[in-house]
Amino acid sequence: GAGVSQSPSNKVTEKGKDVELRCDPISGHTALYWYRQRLGQGLEFLIYFQGNSAPDKSGLPSDRFSAERTGESVSTLTIQRTQQEDSAVYLCASSQVRDSGTDTQYFGPGTRLTVL
Amino acid sequence: AQTVTQSQPEMSVQEAETVTLSCTYDTSENNYYLFWYKQPPSRQMILVIRQEAYKQQNATENRFSVNFQKAAKSFSLKISDSQLGDTAMYFCAFMKRANNDMRFGAGTRLTVKP
């Protein structure tokens, strides 16, 4: 079946503009995650959704970052007043949640954000 | 909080040889999963192998196998018969079974040489 998809694949924006990144999880996956990956570094957890609610927002770096999810499907990550330090690849992942616990996360291809 | 450490920023191996990537982690949890993900230049994160902490048997997926030492909190990845397509960043990850808290190591860049 279809995997996790993200759009756009690349986004170049000017400092101070707002950007919106989209993630379409695997159908039926109730859990959805956002990560940030700076150049040459590992993954930094941002936020996690179970259904449409976000029980863990602890990774959001500032109040300029927000995310929402609707219909237990699509999620958008919004960055307001972008700064150059926001430049990174933003990765989305989804997983099933079973009675036995959370299953493996499957990743999308990411959105490369460049803030000029 | 859980931490994951990959002490080898870069490694290289000759094609058809075997290479082992190291990973250690620190946790007070007893129920958790461990993963190795591969990230080629295309930047797609691809699951390589997964280990459930309550299972003593080491996970194996074709040419990929792990050496899981729970007491030592070590989770190394062995790649046998290395292929050029194995060239990528490899990330070790830890996830609590009870929730969705997943932590990644900093990664090891593996280059397979012809």
Image (tube, grey):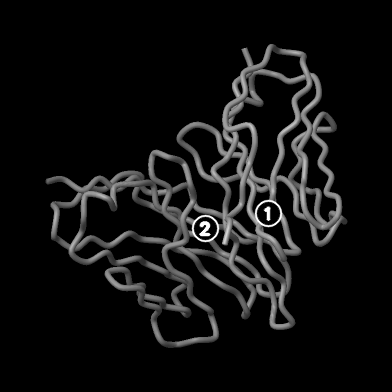
Q: Quadrant of residue B97?
A: bottom right
- Image: A36 above or below A70: above
Q: Which sits in the foreground, A4 or B14?
A: A4
Q: Amino acid at mark 1?
A: Pro
Instruction: Name the mark nearer the viewer: 1 or 2.
Output: 1
Please name the residue shown 68% across and 54% down the image. Answer: A25
In the image, taking residue A101 as reference, residue B14 lies left or right, namely: left
What's under tag 2, amino acid-wise? Val
The x and y percentages for residue B55 are 49, 86
Residue pictured at 40% horizontal, 78% vertical: B59
In percent of width and height, residue A96 lies at 68, 69
Identify the residue position indicated by label 2 in the image.
Answer: B4
Residue at 62 percent across and 18 percent down: it is A12
Q: Chain of mark 1?
A: A
- Residue placed most toward the observer, A59 or A12: A12
Instruction: Please state the horizontal and vertical placement of residue B93, each as a whole percent of the image.
Output: 52, 60
**Residue A35 vertical placement versus B69 (above, below):** above
Above or below residue A87? Residue B2 is below
Assign a secondary structure to mark 2.
Answer: strand
Residue A25, labelled with which disc?
1
* Element carrying mark 1: loop
* Distance from the alpha carbon under mark 1 to that under mark 2: 26 Å
Residue for point 60% across, 34% down:
A111
User: Which corner quadrant of the image does residue A40 belong to?
Assistant: top left
Residue A71 coordinates in the image, percent (x, y): 86, 55
User: Mark 1–mark 2 contact, CB under 8 Å?
Assistant: no
- Toward which corner of the image does residue A115 lie, by quadrant? top right
Q: In the drawing, does residue A61 fall left or right of residue A104?
A: right
**Quadrant for the N terminus of chain B in the image:** bottom right
Question: Dot 1, crowdedness within 10 Å: few (<14), some or many (≥20)?
Answer: many
Q: Chain of mark 2?
A: B
Q: Residues within 10 Å of mark 2 (few under 14, many from 20)?
A: many
